[in-house]
Image (tube, rainbow, N blue to C red):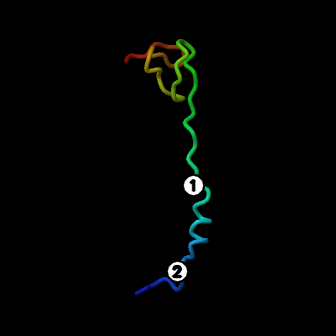
Amino acid sequence: MGAPRRRVTKTRGRDRRTNWKSKPTQLIACPKCGTLVLPHRRCQKCGNYKDKEVLI
């Protein structure tokens, strides 16, 4: 059976994980009512998307 020749050290494992950062959620203001909305989604408050009324 195959087995690892050498165990990965704590430092090497931590170095590999240093770039696992979470990014803050990007929010934009709805042009109609000003509520913060995720990009490319309709506004939950007024139902507006790309200057059009969308069915809720």
Say above or below: 50 vs 25: above
Residue 12's disc number: none
Task: Report helix, strand or loop for mark 1.
Answer: loop
Q: Residue at x 58, y 25 (%)?
A: 28
Residue 27: image quadrant is: top right
Asked if the residue under mark 2 is in contact with the one under mark 1, i.e. CB atoms within 8 Å, the reply is no
Residue 31 sits in which quadrant?
top right
The number of numbered discs placed on residues in the rendered structure image is: 2
- Distance from disc 1 to disc 2, alpha carbons, whole Å, reads 22 Å
Q: Look at the picture and state if 45 lies above or below 27.
A: above
Position of 18 with respect to 7 (left or right) is right
Q: Secondary structure at mark 2?
A: loop
Q: Amino acid at mark 2?
A: Arg
Front-most of residues 22 and 31: 22
How far across and how far down the image is residue 52, in percent?
Answer: 50, 14
Q: Position of residue 45 (x, y in %)?
A: 44, 17
Location of the N terminus (image quadrant):
bottom left
Residue that numbered label 2 is attached to: 7
Residue named by callout 1? 20
